[in-house]
Amino acid sequence: MSDTHPDILTHTEAGVVTLTLNRLDKKNSITASMYTAMADALINAQTDAEVRVVLIQGHETVFSAGNDLGDFLNHPPSGPDSPVFRFMHALSAFPKPLIAAVCGPAVGIGTTLLLHCDLVYAGDNAAFALPFVNLGLCPELASTLLLPQMLGYHRAAEALLLGEPFMAEAALEVGLVNRVLPPTEAANYAQVQARKLAAKPMASLMETKRLMKKGQAALVAQQINDEGACFTRMLHEPAAKEAFSAFMEKRRPDFSKV
Ligand code: COA
């Protein structure tokens, strides 16, 4: 597989496809065309017999600032076939092992996508944040289902309602990440683990993943759709408009009237 988008680098070696978010000047925030490139890469990886594992990574200093807010404002997702939802369904239903290496800020989908990865390795500078409420939105990618299961309801409510960031050690404690490493080592370690997986029998990996996930696969897909409908509606409402304008104007949002 080769690069199809300048901001999503694709490298294939030893059965591992590595997708690297490469939009550092905008903190690896994700545009609609980047979602399309990632969805296409996952769909190709699913059917390509040479691909055994997919690794998603950012940079040592930043994983992703989440959705590109300007792009979202100008090209809001319009329905289930929108790039962001294509990516979410491709990721959540991906049948082969998925690994992430996360350093620095992981905001919004930068954190929720990890809930769909099988192994997550974090730099000790990783900072996770789910600021959907602070943006006048609701969470996505089935995080309203999976996060309470992983963290327990009260810690999930703290993360999703208050939207306060939490660091790598806290993520390790609740099981969101497998291991915390120096940021310079996280991607290499994730690559080593990916290659270990790639050397194992593929059918066993895929059946084991399917069996672990099958209990709630339909529920996850439904939750992505329910959250997506809510998110798409809320994007056009006053709270989100105020939050997005405030971000663009580099000021604090004023929610006193919404
Ligand atoms: N969408 C669009 N542009 C973004 C962005 C986003 N989500 N996040 C950062 N950027 C842009 C900034 O506007 C800035 O652009 P500029 O240089 O043209 O002014 C550039 O990336 C650098 O961002 P900055 O905020 O200066 O970097 P930082 O290191 O101080 O902070 C973050 C990094 C990730 C903590 C911070 O950028 C942030 O909180 N971003 C918004 C995250 C967010 O709310 N995402 C949406 C989730 S649904």
Image (tube, rainbow, N blue to C red):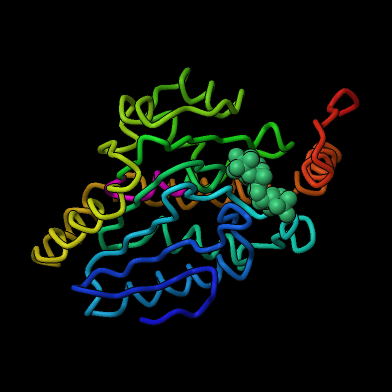
Question: Magenta span has 212?
Answer: no
| Quadrant of residue 96 within the rendered picture | bottom left
**Residue 199 percent coordinates (x, y):** 10, 66
**Residue 202 percent coordinates (x, y):** 14, 67
**Residue 131 percent coordinates (x, y):** 62, 35
Q: Is residue 32 above or below residue 50?
A: above
**Residue 83 percent coordinates (x, y):** 60, 66
Q: Residue furthest front?
A: 184
Q: Nearer the viewer, residue 37 or 91?
A: 37
Residue found 30% across the figure and 44% down from its top: 121
Residue found 39% across the figure and 56% down from its top: 57
Q: Nearer the viewer, residue 120 or 49?
A: 120
Stretch in magenta: 113-120
Tell me the quadrant of the picture where the C terminus can be found.
top right
Q: Is residue 228 above or below residue 175?
A: below
Left or right of residue 77: residue 122: left
Question: Magenta span has 118?
Answer: yes
Residue found 54% across the figure and 68% down from its top: 7
Q: Is residue 230 visible?
A: no
| Quadrant of residue 43 within the rendered picture | bottom left
